[in-house]
């Protein structure tokens, strides 16, 4: 897991992140000052289950290679990480967020103002948050291959075109 969220990191998202951390399950770069486009190498994170690039200044299009997030193309848990979840109200934060993680076996996510407390199994938590950036263009239809996603937040961008038909 890599969590660099809520800092003042700036510059482009380094391409080596996608080339180097092939086992990473959770990548959080949200709430920084990253700009430039999403490098297509980021699609190399085949084991990624949580990708949070929200609240940056990222521009360009959503890469078509998103279907390479193979962990998100299945509704199954890749390993023993995650079977039970409980939702506890949490009043202040707006979107999902891992605000405390002692280990990947006890991860806390924020989603829809609820704290979702995943105990034992992180495997079923599959989220993409690209919200609050400057993304343009269409939502690639490849995103519909990510049938395991439990959350997709594309809000507050400059996306155009139509919503892919097979999105479920
Ligand atoms: C989606 O992102 C926006 C902006 O970052 C946030 O306000 C909203 O609460 C998020 N939606 C969900 C369902 O988490």
Image (cartoon, grey):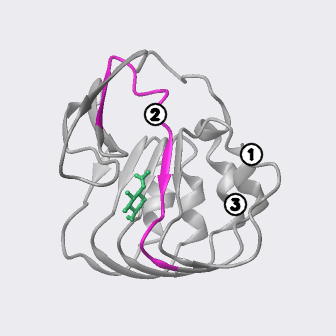
2 and 3 marks in contact (CB < 8 Å): no
Determine which of the numbered discs, if any, sits on residue 65 in the image.
3
Determine which of the numbered discs, if any, sits on residue 89 in the image.
none
User: Within 10 Å of the Cα at label 1, are there few (<14), some (14-19), or many (20+) other Cα atoms?
Assistant: some
Residue 100: percent from left, percent from top: 17, 40
Residue identifier under label 2: 125
Per the image, label 2 sits on a secondary structure element best described as loop
Residue 60: percent from left, percent from top: 58, 82
Residue at x 78%, y 59% (from the top left corner): 164
Residue at x 20%, y 40% (from the top left corner): 90
Per the image, label 1 sits on a secondary structure element best described as helix
Residue 160 drawn above or below residue 121: below
Residue 108: percent from left, percent from top: 26, 34
* Camera-nearest residue between 27 and 58: 58
Residue identifier under label 1: 145
Sequence-wise, which precedes: disc 2 or disc 1? 2
Name which quarter of the figure residue 102 lies in.
Answer: top left
Q: Nearer the viewer, mark 1 or mark 3?
A: 1
Residue 150 drawn above or below residue 122: below
1 and 3 marks in contact (CB < 8 Å): no
The quadrant of the rendering that contains the N terminus is: top left
Q: Which residues are magenta?
A: 115-134
User: Within 10 Å of the Cα at label 3, are there few (<14), some (14-19), or many (20+) other Cα atoms?
Assistant: some
The quadrant of the rendering that contains the C terminus is: top right
């Amino acid at each position: 897991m890599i969590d660099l969220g809520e800092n003042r990191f700036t510059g482009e998202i380094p391409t080596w992140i996608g080339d180097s951390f092939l086992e990473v399950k959770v990548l959080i770069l949200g709430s920084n000052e990253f700009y430039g486009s999403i490098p297509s190498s980021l699609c190399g994170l085949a084991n990624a289950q949580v990708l949070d690039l929200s609240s940056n200044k990222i521009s360009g299009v959503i890469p078509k290679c998103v279907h390479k997030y193979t962990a998100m193309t299945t509704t199954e848990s890749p390993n023993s990480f995650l079977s039970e979840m409980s939702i506890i109200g949490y009043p202040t934060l707006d979107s999902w967020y891992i605000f405390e993680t002692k280990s990947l076996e006890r991860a806390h996510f924020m989603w829809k103002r609820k704290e979702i407390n995943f105990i034992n199994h992180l495997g079923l938590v599959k989220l993409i948050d690209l919200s609050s950036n400057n993304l343009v263009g269409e939502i690639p239809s490849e995103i519909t291959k990510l049938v395991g996603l439990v959350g997709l937040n594309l809000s507050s961008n400059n996306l155009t075109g139509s919503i892919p038909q097979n999105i479920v």
